[in-house]
Image (cartoon, grey):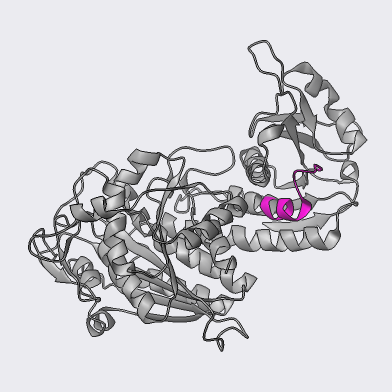
């Protein structure tokens, strides 16, 4: 998608489709109360062209609601699309992000290959953040998951014009648009990885894709395999991978900005991702229904790679180390078994209760290695538990932390990212559930509080290092089409992890 900026009067932009956002200004409530939609533009020609439909009651400016007008009078655009942001009191910059995605997804099945999107004119929606959000939303909205269809036709939007009023500061809008393109493309990079079938994206190939990305954006990188795991005594990581014919991959990326590396007191942020490229459950094999989706079990690792891409291009002044532990979890004759005791890199012994609780094993060694490499603050991401989806559904991802200050930065980052994470509890009660009779800890603590016991397992390896754990299992895959994003991989976590890093 080619992104352009225009500061011309939007009524004079020649385009296949012009999209303008609207809010419902009605504050009263009740079954007989009618919506009062208002366009967020000062252009009188656009207002005039939309006046009839706005007055008809047909369009209520609900969240991502659309109405299309053909040959709008007084406009050079061939079509005028109105996109709702919802109730004015609830509108945020993220509302603009989803509206831009909605506009793009509206055009794609209709064969429209170009559109202009009018930046909203409203006090509560600042131009810079809205510029970034609009471009992000458009790029994310343009992604579809039908990569391997033999009759696939490219329905991508070729041109996206971000139309800003001439009264807006041009440098601010331009900077926002550039940033939005980087973040949107990085989120789509993550989605493209998660979308790949297990036979097309083995741990080795994931390592190659990570290395190619790193080289392209200027990150230092190293990808190693079995020998390195044995050298580092990563017994937990190795135990998961040993049942597969595909060797594991230990992916390490480094971002070192100029002028920061020399400061011994500067923080070093450690990003650790679960990269299980396919998860059968191992000996504790999963049911066959929906097992095909287990190609997405590397979504946490992919989110870290997408975040690193954005970090490299946006250049925050903080050092970052990224570790992705990639493996397949398979039920081979050499696979680890329930009842096995494995020794993690930290020296802790783990009593394996269920081989389908493998993500926490690879993360255990990843967290230890990040600390060994100097990370002073940790964040991990993983499709770790089904329990988090039961608790929060597909509306929020789970977040856990042992440090209120680190989590406060993450919570603040959500205001920019627009993503939804809900802080979940840790505590001695959950830690008690994973105590083992034969070793130091068990890799499961039973069904009750499953997301929290999994987090407490990881807490053992983060120790006292400020740490955040993101359980994205319920949010990494979208089961149904949404107005602003296609079904399939969501890329959740990329924007929030990026903003958390930038907060340092």
Quarter of the figure with the C terminus: bottom right
Q: Position of residue 8 (x, y in %)?
A: 90, 51
Answer yes or no: is residue 318 visible.
yes
Quadrant in the picture for residue 347: bottom left
Answer left or right for 32 relative to 474. right
* Apparent side of residue 491 relative to residue 327 in the rendered image (left or right): right
Q: Is residue 131 magenta?
A: yes
Question: Above or below — where is 268 with respect to 10?
Answer: below
Q: Is residue 104 above or below residue 169?
A: above
Q: How many marks?
A: 0
* Residue 152 magenta: no
Q: Residue at x 24, y 76 (%)?
A: 345
Q: Quadrant of residue 56?
A: top right
Is residue 356 visible from the viewing direction of this image? Answer: no
Which residue shows up at 80% across the image and 37% down it? 40
Q: Residue 493: percent from the left, percent from the top? A: 49, 56
Q: Quadrant of residue 443?
A: bottom left
Taking the image as shown, residue 386 lies to the left or right of residue 30, namely left
Q: Quadrant of the N terminus?
A: bottom right
- The residue depicted at 61 percent of the width and 76 percent of the height is 317
Q: Position of residue 13 (x, y in %)?
A: 86, 46
Nearest the eye: 73 or 459:
459
**Above or below for 393 versus 368:** above
- Residue 380's spot in the image, x, y percent? 40, 63
Magenta span: 121-133
Q: Residue furthest bottom?
A: 262
Q: Nearer the viewer, residue 40 or 330?
A: 40
């Amino acid at each position: 998608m080619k992104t352009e900026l225009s500061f011309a009067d939007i009524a004079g932009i020649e385009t296949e489709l012009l999209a303008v956002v609207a809010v419902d200004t009605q504050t009263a409530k009740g079954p007989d109360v009618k919506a009062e939609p208002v366009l967020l533009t000062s252009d009188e020609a656009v207002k005039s062209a939309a006046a009839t439909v706005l007055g008809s009651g047909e369009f209520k400016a609900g969240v991502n609601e659309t109405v299309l007008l053909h040959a709008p009078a007084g406009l050079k655009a061939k079509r005028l699309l109105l996109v709702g942001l919802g109730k004015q009191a609830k509108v945020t910059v993220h509302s603009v992000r989803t509206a831009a995605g909605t506009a793009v997804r509206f055009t794609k099945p209709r064969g429209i290959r170009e559109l202009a999107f009018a930046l909203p004119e409203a006090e509560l929606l600042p131009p810079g953040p809205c510029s970034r959000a609009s471009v992000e939303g458009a790029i994310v909205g343009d992604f579809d998951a039908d990569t391997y269809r033999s009759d696939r036709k490219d329905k991508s939007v070729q041109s996206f014009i971000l139309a800003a009023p001439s009264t807006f500061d041009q440098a601010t809008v331009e900077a926002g648009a550039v940033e939005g393109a980087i973040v949107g493309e990085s989120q789509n990079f993550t989605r493209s990885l998660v979308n790949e079938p297990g036979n097309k994206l083995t741990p080795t190939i994931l390592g190659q894709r990570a290395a190619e990305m790193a080289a392209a954006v200027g990150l230092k990188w190293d990808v190693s395999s079995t020998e390195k795991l044995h050298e580092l005594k990563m017994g937990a990581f190795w135990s998961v991978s040993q049942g597969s014919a595909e060797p594991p991959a230990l992916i390490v990326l480094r971002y070192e900005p100029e002028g920061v590396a020399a400061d011994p007191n500067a923080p070093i942020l450690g990003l650790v991702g679960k990269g299980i490229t396919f998860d059968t459950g191992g000996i504790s094999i999963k049911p066959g229904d929906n097992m095909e989706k287990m190609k997405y079990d590397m979504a946490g690792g992919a989110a870290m790679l997408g975040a690193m891409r954005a970090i490299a291009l946006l250049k925050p002044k903080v050092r970052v180390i990224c570790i992705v532990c990639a493996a397949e979890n398979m039920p081979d004759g050499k696979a680890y078994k329930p009842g096995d005791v494995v020794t993690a890199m930290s020296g802790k012994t783990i009593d394996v209760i269920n081989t389908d609780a493998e993500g926490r094993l690879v993360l255990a060694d990843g967290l230890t290695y990040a600390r060994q490499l100097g990370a002073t603050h940790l964040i991990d991401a993983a499709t770790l538990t089904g329990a988090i989806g039961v608790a929060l559904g597909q509306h929020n991802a789970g977040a856990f932390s042992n440090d209120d200050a680190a989590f406060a930065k993450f919570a603040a980052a959500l205001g920019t990212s627009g993503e939804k994470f809900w802080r979940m509890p840790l505590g001695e009660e959950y830690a008690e559930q994973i105590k083992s009779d034969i070793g130091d800890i068990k890799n499961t603590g039973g069904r009750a509080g499953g997301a929290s016991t999994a987090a407490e397992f990881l807490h053992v390896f983060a120790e006292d290092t400020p740490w955040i754990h993101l359980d994205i299992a319920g949010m990494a895959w979208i089961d149904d089409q949404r107005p602003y994003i296609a079904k399939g991989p969501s890329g959740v976590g990329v924007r929030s992890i990026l903003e958390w890093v930038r907060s340092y």
